[in-house]
Amino acid sequence: MIEFFPIEANSPGILLIYAAIFFFAILFRYFVAAGIFYYYYYVKNFSKYDKRRLSKRLANKKQFKNEILWSIKSSAIFALVGAATYWLWLEGHTAVYLEPALFGYWYLPVSLLVVSLIHETYYYWVHRWMHHPKVFRVVHKVHHDSRIPTPWTAFSFHPWESFIEALVLPLILIFLPVNVYVLGFYLLVMTISSVVNHLDIEIYPLWFQKSKFGKLFIGATHHHHHHTEFMTNYGLYFTFWDKLMATESKKMQD
C-alpha cells in the first residue's frame, strides 16, 4: 500500500503528525476558496454586485474576525477526523481505493453521486435536530451568529458542530468504495459549495434557478433564507428533502 506520508503508522504521536498536516491543508483550502470569492465579489467588483446582495446591509469586520477564528477551530476538528480516517485507511479499515479502474470508470461518477446523496440525507436531518432550541444554543448558534452570511462563514462552526458534520464522511468511507481522486474532488466541492452558499450574492443565472434542473440545487438565495428564517431550508447541496418534508421557504416557491 502506498503511504502519502512516509512515517511508521504505529509510531507515537502519529495521529498528531497527520492532524498537523491535514490542518494546514484544510486551512489553506478554506482561505484560498473564501478569499478568492471575497476578493472578487466584495473588493474588486463591489459596486457591480452591490445591488444583487441578498441582505440589506453588509457584515461588519467583527463578524469577519469571529468567522475566521471559528473556522480555524473547525479546521482543527476536521483535521483530527481526517487524520483518524487516514490512519484507518493505512490499516486497511476503509473502502478507499487508489486505482480508478478497479471498479470501472463508470463507477467514479456513480460513487460521487451516492456519497453526495448519503451526505445530504445525514446533513438534512442532523441540521434539523441542531435547530431544536436546547441543541441550538450549544451546537449551532455560533454559525447563526452570522446573520448576514459571507464567504468566511463557510467553516464558521462551534467545535461540536464541526465534529458532528465531520463524522459522516469517514463512516461512508468505511463501507462504500470511493476512489481517492473522487474523494479529493468531493472535498473540494464541499468547500466551494459552502462558500458559494454563504456568499450572500446569487451567482447562478435566473434561467438556471427557474429551470426544473436548477431547482434541485441549493445556492446563495436558498441558504440566505435559512439564515434569516432559521426554520426553513435545511439542505446542503440539494432541495429534495426540504421539498419532501415541507421545510422549504415559501419565498423559494414564489
Image (tube, grey):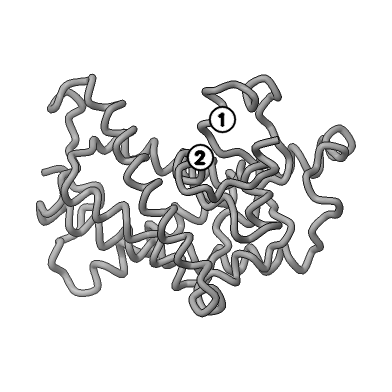
SS of the residue under disc 1: helix
Q: Residue at x 67, y 20 (%)?
A: 207
Of residues 122 and 241, the one drawn nearer to the viewer in this rendering: 241
Indicate the amino acid at tag 1: Lys
Residue 25 visible at all: yes
Q: Position of residue 120 (x, y in %)?
A: 40, 46
Mark 2 lies on residue: 239
Q: Residue at x 70, y 52 (%)?
A: 150
Q: Would you place residue 49 above or below residue 21 in this image?
A: above
Of residues 217 and 84, the one drawn nearer to the viewer in this rendering: 217
Q: Residues within 10 Å of mark 1 (few under 14, many from 20)?
A: some
Q: Which mark is residue 112?
A: none
Q: Viewed as shown, does residue 120 lie left or right of 106? A: right
- Marks 1 and 2 in Cβ contact (< 8 Å): yes
Q: Residue at x 21, y 27 (%)?
A: 100
Quadrant placement of the N terminus:
top left
Q: Viewed as shown, does residue 18 lie left or right of 78? A: left
Q: Would you place residue 111 above or below residue 78 in this image?
A: above
Quadrant placement of the C terminus:
top right
Q: Quadrant of residue 78?
A: bottom left
Q: Viewed as shown, does residue 204 lie left or right of 49? A: left
Indicate the amino acid at tag 2: Thr
**Closer to the N terminus: mark 1 or mark 2?**
1
SS of the residue under disc 2: loop
Mark 1 lies on residue: 215
Q: Position of residue 108 (x, y in %)?
A: 26, 27
Q: CA distance from mark 1 to mark 2?
A: 7 Å
Q: Residue at x 80, y 50 (%)?
A: 55
Q: Residues within 10 Å of mark 2 (few under 14, many from 20)?
A: many
